[in-house]
Amino acid sequence: MTNNFDGTLNFNTIAQHGGQEFDGETNARAVPIYQTTSYGFESPEQAASLFQMQEAGYIYSRNANPTNRVLEKRIAELEGGIDAFAVSSGQSAITIALLTLAKVGDEIVATNELYGGTYNLFSETFKRFGVTVRFVEGTNFSEISASINENTKAVFTETIGNPGLQIADIKALSSIAHEHGIPLVVDSTFTTPYLQKPISFGADIVIHSTTKFIGGHGTSIGGIIVDSGKFNWDNGNFPEFTTPKSSLNNQSYVELKNDNAFISKARFELGHDIGTALSPFNGWLFIQGLESLPLRMKQHVLNTKQIAAYLAEHEQVTWVNYPGLSENHQYELAKTYLPKGTGAILTFGIEGGHEAAKSFIQSLKLLSHVANIGDSKTLVIHPASTTHARLSPEEQKRTGVTPDQIRISVGLEDVEDIKYDIHQALKKSRG
Ligand SMILES: *Cc1c(COP(=O)(O)O)cnc(C)c1O
């Protein structure tokens, strides 16, 4: 942490204050919940000007809402981006970000190891929309480069792949994308801006499922899209950004004076047309989550390291995957990309394979068997039969899912209590 007394704020401070200005009426200290659908216009001329994006202001909460605006500005600031668009889920954030770039006939190149829902979105739903996603091995840079053609509009990866925990080499991936004149889009849900700022390594667009660590308490579904402001949309590959539109007073998105082409297009086209608005109450809960994010992430990492070390020593455990363990094959890469810790997700296998894994999960008393991560409570799941069950055995192998694999999202309980529950459940799984 530095303080140059030049007014630039550090991370923990931004997590408390970013994006908020006191409203002129009450000077409320906490961010108010603006539970409203619509906002009064000052005149017919002002209404028209707002609709044509000639001035900033609120129209309707499907597009923008003052509570959610604080969340958007705060996360953009934490990530080192210029702006953000908060939406109703992580899935809608991925959909809107990528379909703002790609239309029917276009392609996207995505790394193999992905959240199950994202894999299905790409392989089934995007296909129905006429957008082809080519899946590539995230460390095979020549294959990635070769998979990009004149129709490709983005490269997509997760900062830490799910559930194989592959750490994305964002510098390498962004160089490849930029050589081809397309942006790198990164799902940073597993890391949060506390553990990594993908933009600092060259990512252009960052996405979060705020449902997870940002909310932090397993209460609300939400997502966000952050724009780095660094990608040049005027490079010939994105005519939808540079063609004047009558709806924008005959300007193009890159010509808007808010200098915010990507988020404007995402917000006023797909966000507006499809309607993936975030409830202001959920937005407010995510703001509460951000305020404790630095403290929680620190403790998540501490607990996870200890659970990983405990499992690695356990006689019934056949393997443990946590990039923060010194014996892990990604330990060196983690030093570059995740110096503050490699997150709170680990996977492991136990003697007896799938059957023993089922019995282990059934025998847990404290750890919760749920399809979520990033809660303050420790969560456990068997990916092959649940989150990644729609994948064929070959697809599972490709995305880092194995039949004996158990995934834990380590929470904030006393670590000795988490260990005890694992101990007693492993004992029972011996059968
Ligand atoms: C949960 C998750 C998503 C989807 O987010 P939702 O908020 O559940 O729609 C996307 N990516 C990753 C890595 C996730 O963990």
Image (cartoon, helix red, strand yellow):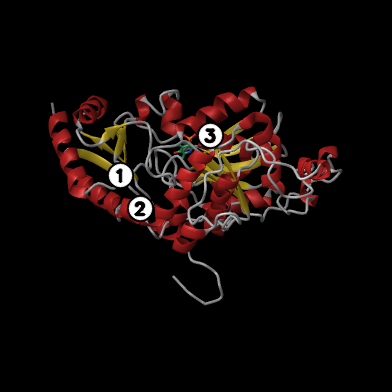
Q: Position of residue 185 (x, y in %)?
A: 59, 45
Please give left or right for residue 56 compared with residue 191 in the image: right
The amino acid beneath tag 3 is Gln
Q: Which residue is mark 1?
A: 410
Please give left or right for residue 43 compared with residue 154 in the image: right
The amino acid beneath tag 1 is Val
Mark 3: give few (<14), some (14-19) or many (20+) Cα within 10 Å.
Answer: many
Q: Secondary structure at mark 1?
A: loop
Callouts 3 and 1 close, C-beta under 8 Å: no
Residue at image point 30% right, 44% down: 410
Which mark is first along the chain, 1 or 3? 3
Quadrant assignment, res 338: bottom left
**Residue 425 in view in this figure:** yes
Q: Position of residue 283 (x, y in %)?
A: 51, 43
The amino acid beneath tag 2 is Arg
Residue at image point 39% right, 59% down: 340
Depth check, mark 1 against mark 2: the one in front is 2
Along the line of sight, which residue is nearer the eye, 361 or 254? 254
Question: Ligand 1: does it lie within 8 Å of the C-beta at label 3?
Answer: yes
Q: Which numbered dot is residue 296?
A: 2
Cα distance, mark 3 to mark 2? 24 Å
Which mark is first along the chain, 2 or 1? 2
Residue at image point 53% right, 43% down: 157
Depth check, mark 3 against mark 2: the one in front is 2
